[in-house]
Amino acid sequence: PEKYSLYRQLMLSNVGVCILLYGTKDNEDKVVLSQGMKEEFELARSNGALIIPIGITGGRSLEVANQLIADNYHSEDLEYLKNETQYDLIVERIMSMIHEHIKTVEEVN
């Protein structure tokens, strides 16, 4: 676990966008939410990355989406990504979010 945490810290220390998919794992023949993805979300968020959970995939991604929506963080986009089933439309919305994020970062800098 310590190595994984260190790896996550290194991986996410300089990331600008964090896309979360699914977030489940098998544990003793049961499907459970991924603690690793929760840690990745928290690290990416604390580093100021744009967080894009694809809620339609379920698992921890859906939990994170619901949490962010409750925090009024990109609520309209995340609601869309919780319900849309057409992959091309999902990708289009993700790209739009990233494009807007880049514009915002460039304006600040």
Image (tube, rainbow, N blue to C red):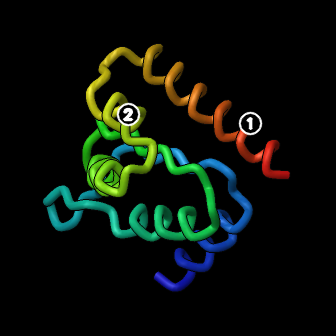
Percent x, y of residue 108: 79, 51
Instruction: Tell me the SS state at disc 2.
Output: helix
- Which label sits on residue 56? none
User: Residue at the location (81% across, 43% down)?
Assistant: 106
Give whichever of 60, 84 is nearer the camera: 84
Residue in the image at 36% along x and 15% along y:
86
Number of the label disc, if any, that sits on residue 103: 1
Asked if residue 103 is positioned above or below residue 61 in the image, the reply reads above
The type of residue carrying mark 1 is Lys
Q: Position of residue 37 (x, y in %)?
A: 42, 61
Mark 2 neighbour density, 10 Å: few (under 14) some (14–19) many (20 or more)? few
Horizontally, is 48 left or right of 38 in the view? right
Lateral position of residue 58 relative to residue 43, left or right: left
- Closer to us: 37 or 98: 98
Q: Give the farthest residue toward the right.
A: 109
The residue sitting at 22% across, 65% down in the picture is: 27
The x, y position of residue 33, in whole percent, is: 26, 60
Image side of residue 108 versus residue 75, left or right:
right
Tell me, for residue 76, which label it has, or none: 2
Quadrant housing residue 32 = bottom left
Quarter holding residue 103: top right
